C-alpha cells in the first residue's frame, strides 16, 4: 500500500476521533491531508523509500490565529496519534508530516504565504517547488483556505507565463539535442555530448509537463510522474533511452533519430494547442513563434531562453 493511503487510514481510523474528542473547538479550523516534500506525497514511494526520512503520520495545516491559541495542544494530540518511531533523517529533509502554519507551508515553496501573486513569481519559482506545494491529498478543510491556495497553484499559472516557459524549453531542446549533441561528438567531446543529451532530456520533460499544464516534480521523479500524463507521457521510455542507451556508432544514429521523433511530437502538440503556426522540423523557430503569441509586453520582451 502506498504511504499516502496508510496515512489516510491512520487519520480515519485513529486521528479523526482523537481530534474530535480532544480538540472539538478547533477541529473545524484544521486542514488535514498529506502534501509537500517527499516521494510519498506524490504517491511515488516504495519499500526503498522507507529506509530514510520515514515515520507514520499526516499533515495538519492551521492558520496563525489557531496556532497561537492551540498550536502546542494540537501538536501534542498529533504526537499521540502518530507516535515517534522513525528512520534516520537527512539534514536536508523537511518532512511533510506534522503540524504546520498554512503561511509557513506555502512560503517554503513559493516565497509567499500562498500561491504566487505576480507573473514574476510564477515565472521564477522552480517547477518542483510548485509541484511539492500542490501534490498529495487533502481530506478535510472546512475553512477552505489551504485548499484555495492549493487550487490556484495547481491551475492558476498565467497562460503568458506558460507560453514563455514553453518557448524557453523549445530553444533549449533545439540547441542541446538537435544541434549540440552531434556537434560535440564531431569535436570528440563525448562528455559534452552526454551533457547535451541530459540538457535535452531535462528540457523535454519540462516541456511535456507544461503542455499538460502540470508542474514537473524534482528531477528524480520526473519520469515517474510522466506515467500519468495524458499528452506525450508515452515519450518517457524514449527519453530514458537517450540517457541509458549504448553510445556506440549505431547507438548514436539511433539517438539522433529519437531526438528528432521527440521534437516532431512536441511540435505536433504545440500546434494542437495553437502555440505555433509555422512549419519547421527545428524547434528554435517555433520558440519565437510562441513568443509572438504572448500578450503581456513585459513577458514578451524577455530573452527567449529566460523562464
Image (spheres, helix red, strand yellow):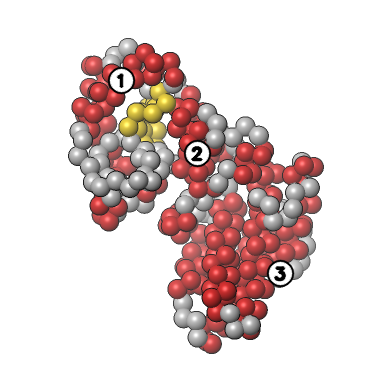
Residue 257 visible, this angle: no
Query: Reading the chain from its start, which is encountered first: label 1 or label 3?
Result: 1
* Above or below, comparing residue 184 to residue 12 in the picture: below
Q: How much space separates mark 2 and mark 3, taking CA atoms?
A: 35 Å
Local crowd size for mark 3, using a 10 Å CA cut-off: few (<14), some (14–19), many (≥20): some
Task: Report helix, strand or loop for mark 3.
Answer: loop
Q: Position of residue 190 (x, y in %)?
A: 55, 79
| Residue for badge 1 | 72
* Above or below, comparing residue 260 to residue 27 in the picture: below
Q: Nearer the viewer, mark 1 or mark 3?
A: 1
Residue 211 visible, this angle: yes
Q: How much space separates mark 1 and mark 3, taking CA atoms?
A: 59 Å
| Residue for badge 3 | 282
Local crowd size for mark 2, using a 10 Å CA cut-off: few (<14), some (14–19), many (≥20): many
- 19 left or right, relative to 234: left
Local crowd size for mark 1, using a 10 Å CA cut-off: few (<14), some (14–19), many (≥20): few
- 91 left or right, relative to 212: left
Proximity of marks 1 and 3: CB atoms separated by less than 8 Å:
no
Which residue occupies the extreme front position in the image?
Answer: 91
Query: Reading the chain from its start, which is encountered first: label 1 or label 2?
Result: 1
Q: Position of residue 242 (x, y in %)?
A: 51, 72
- 136 left or right, relative to 112: left
Say which residue appears at 59% left-offset and 35% top-offset. 116
Amino acid at each position: 500500500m502506498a504511504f499516502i493511503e496508510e496515512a489516510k487510514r491512520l487519520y480515519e481510523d485513529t486521528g479523526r476521533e482523537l481530534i474530535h474528542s480532544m480538540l472539538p473547538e478547533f477541529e473545524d479550523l484544521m486542514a488535514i491531508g498529506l502534501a509537500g516534500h517527499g516521494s510519498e506525497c506524490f504517491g511515488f514511494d516504495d519499500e526503498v523509500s522507507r529506509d530514510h526520512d520515514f515515520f507514520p503520520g499526516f499533515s495538519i495545516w492551521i492558520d496563525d490565529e489557531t496556532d497561537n491559541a492551540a498550536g502546542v495542544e494540537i501538536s501534542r494530540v498529533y504526537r499521540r496519534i502518530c507516535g515517534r518511531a522513525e528512520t534516520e533523517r537527512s539534514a536536508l529533509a523537511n518532512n511533510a508530516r506534522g503540524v504546520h502554519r498554512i503561511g509557513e507551508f506555502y512560503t517554503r515553496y513559493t516565497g509567499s504565504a500562498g500561491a504566487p501573486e505576480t507573473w514574476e513569481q510564477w515565472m521564477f519559482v522552480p517547477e518542483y517547488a510548485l509541484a511539492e506545494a500542490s501534490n498529495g491529498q487533502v481530506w478535510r478543510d472546512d475553512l477552505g483556505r489551504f485548499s484555495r491556495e492549493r487550487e490556484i497553484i495547481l491551475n492558476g499559472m498565467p497562460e503568458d507565463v506558460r507560453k514563455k516557459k514553453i518557448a524557453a524549453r523549445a530553444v533549449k531542446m533545439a540547441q542541446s539535442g538537435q544541434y549540440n549533441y552531434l556537434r560535440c561528438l564531431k569535436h570528440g567531446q563525448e562528455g559534452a555530448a552526454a551533457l547535451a543529451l541530459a540538457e535535452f532530456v531535462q528540457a523535454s520533460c519540462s516541456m511535456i509537463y507544461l503542455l499538460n499544464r502540470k508542474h514537473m516534480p524534482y528531477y528524480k521523479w520526473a519520469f515517474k510522474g510522466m506515467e500519468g500524463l495524458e499528452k506525450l507521457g508515452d515519450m518517457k521510455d524514449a527519453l530514458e533511452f537517450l540517457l541509458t542507451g549504448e553510445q556506440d556508432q549505431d547507438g548514436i544514429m539511433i539517438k539522433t533519430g529519437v531526438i528528432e521523433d521527440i521534437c516532431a511530437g512536441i511540435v505536433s502538440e504545440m500546434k494542437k494547442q495553437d502555440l505555433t503556426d509555422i512549419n519547421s522540423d527545428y524547434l528554435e523557430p517555433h520558440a519565437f513563434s510562441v513568443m509572438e503569441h504572448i500578450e503581456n509586453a513585459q513577458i514578451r520582451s524577455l530573452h527567449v531562453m529566460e523562464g
